[in-house]
Amino acid sequence: MVEVKYFGAVAEKTKCEFEKLSFSEELSLQKLLNDLNEKYEFDSLTFSVAVNQKIVSKASDYTLKTSDVVALLPPFAGG
Amino acid sequence: MKESTRYNRQIILPEIGKEGQYKLSKSKVLVIGAGGLGASILPYLAAAGVGEIGIVDDDTIEISNLHRQVIYKTSIVGKSKAEEAKYIVLELNPEIKVEAFAVKLSGENAISLFENYDIIVDATDNISIKYLINDACLVTHKPMVYGSIFRFQGQVSVFNYQNGPTYRCLYPDEKSNALNCEDAGVIGITVGIIGMLQANEVIKIILGIGTVLSGKILVYNILNNEQQKYDFEKSSDFVITKEDFDSKYNSFENQVEEINFEILLNEIANDEVLFLDVRNEDELPKIEFKNSIQIPLLNLEKEIEKLGKNQIIYVFCQSGIRSKIAVELFNKNQFSKVKSITGGALAMKQLLKEEKI
């Protein structure tokens, strides 16, 4: 299981602020992001990705571990 | 020197003392934006005795601002935000110096403005201005105290602090502009809290106390009171020189020309011009003419070659922000007759209604 947190406009798309996703085989961060993109159609949204409170490159080949927490952080613009 | 008791309660804090108060009185802070965030930041900086404050905002106060820009009174609707904010904070603390700049921050004025201050506070509501502030802070070596909100959530960070990570390290993709044309809605408390956190970072930087939010972004959700900090690193060695800055913001081809729709009413159905809607297909109100087409901004780069470089094109989006980005893209591709319609579809619809077209 990994936990994914959503913020701002991304959470508007997912209609939830977090969810727990189970995976059986090895799951890379890239694959997770692709799956989420397919599910929620983020395509027009920009966001940074954090794993365990640290912003990482979306292209990283990091393999997710059980209990990892991923967060999708779009920029905010209001003020 | 006259001894005022004004700052007594903060001077007795061991972290501040007379020395800290002296540092505050010698500091110069430029606040860009006197809207929701600015209305929260400015009174606290002024009250604490920040010696010099600059306020940049070219807007005037509207009645729909007052629910969140709580320093302004109903009686001053229509007046300049920068000027009124100056008057308000000087009344709060006449011992400081305040300067109002009722201008729009641009590539032309940013560097010379920033050079006169120690800390730059981003209290704007527009992503492309945030990149401009970031880049001008890099050129002038100033820290940028960033704050921004989306509905009930806010972000705070300090960029370029002692050569630390910048806004571009967190958000390298400048096209994120595309999302911010329409207003998402906001309650005053959100900007109040986030603005106050920004003011807190400013005071910490000046006094050299606590841990500055450098290389970290704080995300605050006021609905569940959760706050999270995320670490981010400086991406390679990101340097912007004055030359890079000028070629990005001040070169001729990057001058985006804007035009009012009012002047274009006669061009509707004129075969020689093209109206281009860069919104996504599901955005309302629909605006369609015989000579209009729709290419969402995200697809524009791919489809730009379908258009002629000498074609007269008037670009619009929902409120006039994405269309400016589109014009920049056209300019980069050597189009010479492309302009952005001020105020976008919302302004156009209004005028079409008034003119009964």
Image (cartoon, coloured by chain):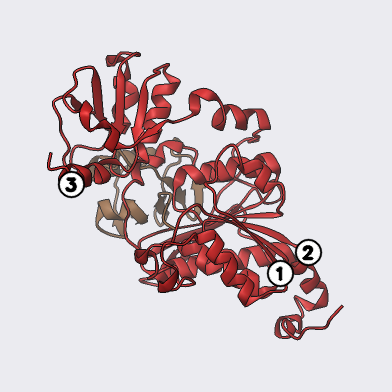
Q: Is residue B172 left or right of residue B180?
A: right
> On the image, numbered disc 1 is attached to which residue?
B96
**Which chain hosts label 2?**
B
User: What's the residue type where badge 2 is placed?
Assistant: Lys
Residue B272 found in image quarter: top left
Residue at left offset 37%, top offset 71%: B67
Mark identifier at residue B73: none
Q: Nearer the viewer, mark 2 or mark 3?
A: 3
**Which chain hosts label 1?**
B
Q: Are marks 3 and 1 on the same chain?
A: yes
Residue B9 found in image quarter: bottom right
Q: Are marks 1 and 2 on the same chain?
A: yes
**Which chain hosts label 3?**
B
Which residue is at the front of the view, B151 or B80?
B80
Residue at left offset 64%, top offset 45%: B137
Element on which disc 1 rests? loop
Spatial distance from mark 3 to mark 1, Cα to Cα? 48 Å
> On the image, numbered disc 3 is attached to which residue?
B354
Spatial distance from mark 2 to mark 3, Cα to Cα? 54 Å
The chain assigned the colour red in the figure is: B
Q: Nearer the viewer, mark 3 or mark 1?
A: 3
Spatial distance from mark 1 to mark 2, Cα to Cα? 10 Å
Q: Is residue B254 left or right of residue B205?
A: left
User: What's the residue type where badge 3 is placed?
Assistant: Glu
| The color chain A is rendered in | brown
Picture coordinates of residue A66 (x, y %)?
Answer: 39, 54
Q: In the rendered picture of this protein, how many numbered marks are placed on residues?
A: 3
| Earlier residue among tags 1 and 2 | 2
Residue at left offset 41%, top offset 46%: A64
Residue A38 in sight here: yes
